[in-house]
Amino acid sequence: MRLSSRFAALAGAALTVAALVGSTPASAGAVPDQAGDGGHNAHGQWQRASEYLNLHQCVYFPLVPAGAQRFTTLVPSRDGRFATGTNISNTPNSTPSCGRGDGNFLPIPVLSGVKALPLT
């Protein structure tokens, strides 16, 4: 699957966020908790709890073409109609998870995909 430039830019931003949010102190168990330490260890070493950023790209086409173009989603939607399975996991995803559409726009499985990016 070839990534579009927008998809690649989102992947870079998501990796940065995942690296910052998904990090835990490597030696947290070895360093006693003390008031004011913020949960950081003395050595500044960090490890990620998850190994993969699974970016799901879902493409939707209009049921009745009337000048409308296809559109792509990369992040989940609140109501699930145009959802994606983008997640951080210990295992890579190989099949895209897409919402069912809204009746006017339907998912196109052959144009949708998933890219598992290792975080290590």
Image (cartoon, helix red, strand yellow):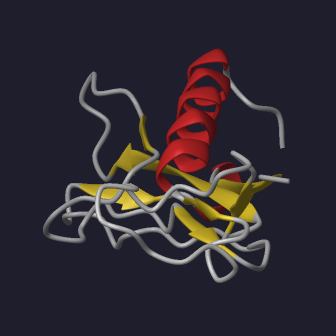
Q: Which residue is drawn at 52% across and 43% down?
A: 20
As displayed, is residue 66 above or below residue 95? above
Q: Nearer the viewer, residue 61 or 65?
A: 61
Residue 28 occupies quadrant: bottom right
Q: Nearer the viewer, residue 29 or 87?
A: 29
Q: Which residue is drawn at 74% across and 63% down?
A: 52
Horizontal and vertical percent position of residue 17: 50, 40
As displayed, is residue 32 above or below residue 17? below
Horizontal and vertical percent position of residue 56: 58, 56
Horizontal and vertical percent position of residue 6: 56, 20
Q: Residue at x 74, y 73 (%)?
A: 93
**Among all residues in the image, which is located at the extreme top?**
5
Horizontal and vertical percent position of residue 15: 63, 40
Q: In this view, does 90 lie to the left or right of 38?
A: right
Quarter holding the N terminus? top right
Q: State how many labels appear.
A: 0
Q: In this view, does 102 lie to the left or right of 18?
A: left
Q: Residue at x 64, y 28 (%)?
A: 12
As displayed, is residue 16 above or below residue 30? above
Q: Which of 59 and 97 is in front in this view?
A: 97
